[in-house]
Image (cartoon, rainbow, N blue to C red):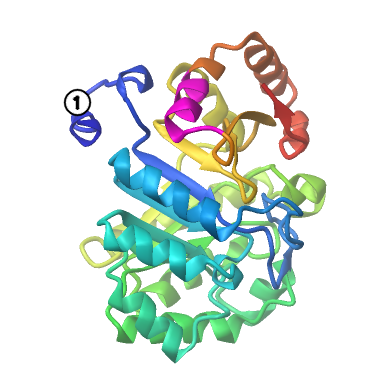
Amino acid sequence: MTQALATIPGASVEQYEAPLFIAWQINAECNLNCFHCCEEAGMAFPDQMSKAQMLDLCAQIVKAQIPYVALSGGEPLICPHFWDVLEYLRKNNVSVKIETNGEFIDEKVARRLGALTLRSVQISMDGATAKSHEALRERGNWQKVIRACKLLRDTSANIEIVFVPTRFNIHEVGEAVDLAASLQAHGFYTGKLMRIGRAAQNWQKLCPSDDQYREFFAVLEQKKALYLGRMKVFNYPYDVIEELRYRLEAPAASLLVLPNGKVKLIGPLPFICGDVTVMPLTQVWRNYKKAWKDKRVTEFASRVLKNPALVAEANRWREL
């Protein structure tokens, strides 16, 4: 079985008959205009998946026994088919994480999410203060984020906080960890700023200095020790280039599905390896494994490793 292979030390992507994880961007619409958005979210795709196409993908996920799906956007809670997708997956015992900005979580939504026993609800909180958070998230409302966390906490939902460091908010990471703990979050997740999408466009304005990063990681180590056993404080060890270098040798057993059903090879590269609206998920998975050896991919990836600025092309898709 696919799930059993997850426990085999050193298992490679070639050994899996299906992915272990689906990262599914179910829509592109968003109420915010964040300066560091990797997906450049805002407007709906003209060819966005229909409800029938989404539920067909859900059925294929269940049939393939894929154990874990993350639903994101855009802002997934404004997708008209969000609840249909979520409830289908949970009814069939697929573990689901929701990645949201939190601004649409009121009492009713919190109760509904809490009742579904999700793996987690991951909320973006890019500052310990409204000033820092809203400086990065144009039209954002920090108070709504805090309220969402409190409402979810009252339903016993598993809350995770995601903090994206930039030169405007990185100094608040310690306070942000403390705030997450006070909100009874199960985890606080952060790492280096990803140079993709609008973050790439605004790189010179957003990217923290080496000194800022050194202080940032030192503070995180202190907070890890402080909250050990109470809240997980995790910083992802790779930046986007380090991640790409690693994945060229060891591709992840996962697929990144875009709002129109196209499947992207990996965030920092522009390559599309399939389309779940016109081919079975099993075929997409075969294409994905083959794509990592495609000369077009390896040559472009080599150029990116030499010139990281090329990740600015990540959202200019190229069909393989």
Report the residue marked by disc 1. 8
Q: In which quadrant will I find the C terminus?
A: top right
Which quarter of the figure has residue 34? bottom right
For image coordinates 57% across by 46% down, the residue present is: 192
Q: Is residue 148 above or below residue 8?
A: below
Q: How many marks?
A: 1
| Residue nearest the viewer, comparing 31 with 227 | 31
Residue 119 seen: no
Q: Is residue 67 above or below residue 188?
A: above
Residue 49 image position (x, y, % from top left): 61, 53
Q: In which quadrant will I find the N terminus?
A: top left
Query: Which residue lies most toward the front here?
Result: 52
Q: Is residue 299 above or below residue 3?
A: above
- Left or right side of 155 for 258: right
For image coordinates 56% across by 18% down, the residue present is: 291
What predominant SS class does the magenta segment belong to? helix
Tag 1, which secondary structure? loop
| Residue nearest the viewer, comparing 13 with 162 | 13
Q: State yes or no: residue 284 in magenta.
A: yes
Residue 212 image position (x, y, % from top left): 62, 52
Query: Which residue lies most toward the top here?
Result: 295
Which quarter of the figure has residue 279? top right
- Amino acid type at image mark 1: Ile
- Left or right side of 135 for 228: left
Residue 238 image position (x, y, % from top left): 51, 37
Residue 247 image position (x, y, % from top left): 49, 25
Q: Which residues are magenta?
A: 279-289
Q: State yes or no: residue 84 in magenta.
A: no
For image coordinates 44% across by 57% down, the residue present is: 189
